[in-house]
Structures are given as structure tokens and as C-alpha cells.
Image (cartoon, helix red, strand yellow):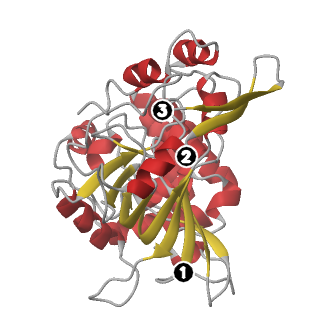
Amino acid sequence: MAGLSRLIAKELSEILGTTVSTKADDTVEALGKAPTVSKDNDYLTIDNSNYKELRGSIDESVDAKTAEKLFDSGEENIDKIRKSQAPNRKQEQSGKRPFKEFAQKLETDEITPKEFRKIAFSDIKNFKSVEQLPTFTEAVFALDKQKRSQGILGLPKTYKKDEPIIYSGAKVRARLDIPAYNRFNVYMPQIDFSGKKGKGSMFARTMVIEDVKFSSSSSASFNISRGIKTKYPHAYIMGKVAESSKTKKMFSDKEARDLALNAIDDITFLHLGYNPDRGGFFYDRLSKMPVFDSPFVIQIGKQVYAKKPPKWGMFDLERRKKLKKLKLEKYIDSEGKEQIKEGRSILMNKGGLVQRPDR
């Protein structure tokens, strides 16, 4: 292990032009709860299985400089970092679906939608704490070449020349980049935007959006949950980039996380999730029921906090209508053929009503 660390340190020194220490004392310090970081030490790309503890305890200005230096170092050098990091960070093997057996039983009506949801949502609870932001350095090596070249918000060197930069008031469509979190446990929203300053697409560590609609696909979810297809983009947070009343600009990463810290224990906010293995809709992690819209949404990596809609609850007739319309119209069977399900509800049992959520 020591030999591997020295090899990686040597490679990083050559790549980034910095001095990377491999002394035992430095390694112990890097793994501690409150690591101190030298401005000459590329601490984030060392082969460190305890990397998560480094988030939230770093000098972001140093991190940003390291990230931009890595971005400029070339694809071959970045790929070395990716290969050294992936084994310790891999989250999910494509094609392994946790509820595949039960999704297949749902397809053949061996279990009801209510029974499936009880199994799929059994371990879902509200967030206990607001996660730390991924570092800029992680963002650079977690995204592949084509994606990082679109621009990472907060790293000006990654911005496309003469291309628009995302700004407050722009209409957006946000989704998480799947390979980045599958391979590196780095959750980066991809933001497609358009407005008076033009159209573009960038990646960001956080996003604060207002007047939000949640878009998803029951058919895509069902195909993924049964292992017929691997994960692919089909669920989006759509709205307008919110403006900070203090700066009159879009919320910074720090401001967004501060908002989340306030929202996590605020009863007027819902904690949201989306996972095609569990169902084809964004859901409230407390009630396990679908959420279709929100006046204000804060996204911190994979965590989403949504202000409750004004009529949230059983008296929201419009929402109840939407719940009844959540149907599985078609899907792909195990032989790759498209099947029509005649609009079977994904929340109702045959001939029944929408099930009351368990709280």
C-alpha cells in the first residue's frame, strides 16, 4: 500500500507540479477527523478510502486552484486520477437492481402496487443531516471529458469561450449525472438552461430553483427496475434559477447549503427522493407519495429539499387528480417487445382507491 501511495504521489507531482507527501504521519493526519491541508498537497486525489471525511474541512480557494490545474493538465493525466479513484468509490454496478424480483412479480400481477411500494420504500426516511458538497477537484475527475468541457460552475477555466453562463432567472432542466455517482460517488446536477443570454448546459454542485415541476416516466422506471434497461436520463427538476435577495444573483454553493441547513428541520419543506427502482416519480421521503411541483427547491448533491405546495395535503384536489392519473401505459418485456398495460395505475390496486400512505 505504501508503495502504491508513493507511486500515485509521484504521478500527481508530475501532473500538477506540486509536492505530495507520503510520510506515515501525513497519512494519519489526512485520515483524521479534522485534517489540516498544505497548499502544496493535492490531498484529494491520493488513494484515500476515507475521502468523504475531507469534504467540508478544506480551503475552497485552494481546492478550486487544484481543480483548474487538473482540468488543464490533459485527458491522459486526468484519466490516471480516475483509474486510481474508481475502485474505492464505486457505488453501483450497472444492471444489478435491488427490487428486480418484486418488479417482475408486479409485472405478472403476483403482487399489487401497494405490496411492491411497501417493500421498495421500507428503508426510506427523511435526511438526518445535510451532506457536504463534493470538492471541485472531485467534480473535475468524476465527469468525463465531454461533460466537464461543458463547464463546471465555480471554475471559470472550464467555461466555454463566448458561451453563456447560467444565471438567475434562466429557465432550467436539472438532473444528476449517473456515471459520476455510480463510479465516483460524486453527485453533480447537469443544468440545461435557456434565457435572454442564450442556451447552454453546465454542471453544478448545487442548484436553487423556483416554480418547479417534477418530470419523470413510469415506463422508463419500470423497465429499469426489472433490469430490462440500465439507468438513463428520464427524470428532471424543471423551473427557474432562483435569485438571492442579498446579492441579486443566483445562490452560491455556500448560500445553497445554508438554505438546506435551515430547510432540513423546517416542517414546511419536504425531503425528496427519486429512484427508478422504487417507482417512476419524485417522492416525499416521509409519506412515500409522489410530489409533482414545488414553489422552491434546494438541491445539494443527491439531496433535494422542496417547499410544500400551498395546497399540500388531502384537500389539494388538483394533486389528487394527478395521483389518479399516474398510470403505466406501456413497458418492454423480457424479450424486448413493447407491451401495452392499458393504463394500469401504479398507485392503485385493481378496482381500488389510492392507498393511504403509511407515516
In the depicted structure, whether residue 335 falls above or below residue 222: above
In the depicted structure, whether residue 10 falls above or below residue 108: below
**Foreground residue among 182 and 249:** 249
Q: Residues within 10 Å of mark 1 (few under 14, many from 20)?
A: many
Residue tagged by mark 3?
347
Question: Residue 305, position in %: x, y?
Answer: 32, 56
Label 3 and label 1: CA atoms lie apart by: 34 Å
Q: What amino acid is at disc 3?
A: Leu
In the depicted structure, whether residue 338 falls above or below residue 136: above
In the depicted structure, whether residue 42 falls above or below residue 252: above
Q: What amino acid is at disc 1?
A: Ala
Residue 180 shows which numbered tag?
2
Tag 3 and tag 1, C-beta contact below 8 Å? no
Label 2 and label 3: CA atoms lie apart by: 31 Å
Q: Is mark 1 on a helix, strand or loop?
A: loop
Residue tagged by mark 1?
170
Residue 88 shows which numbered tag?
none
Residue at screen point 51% across, 12% down: 111
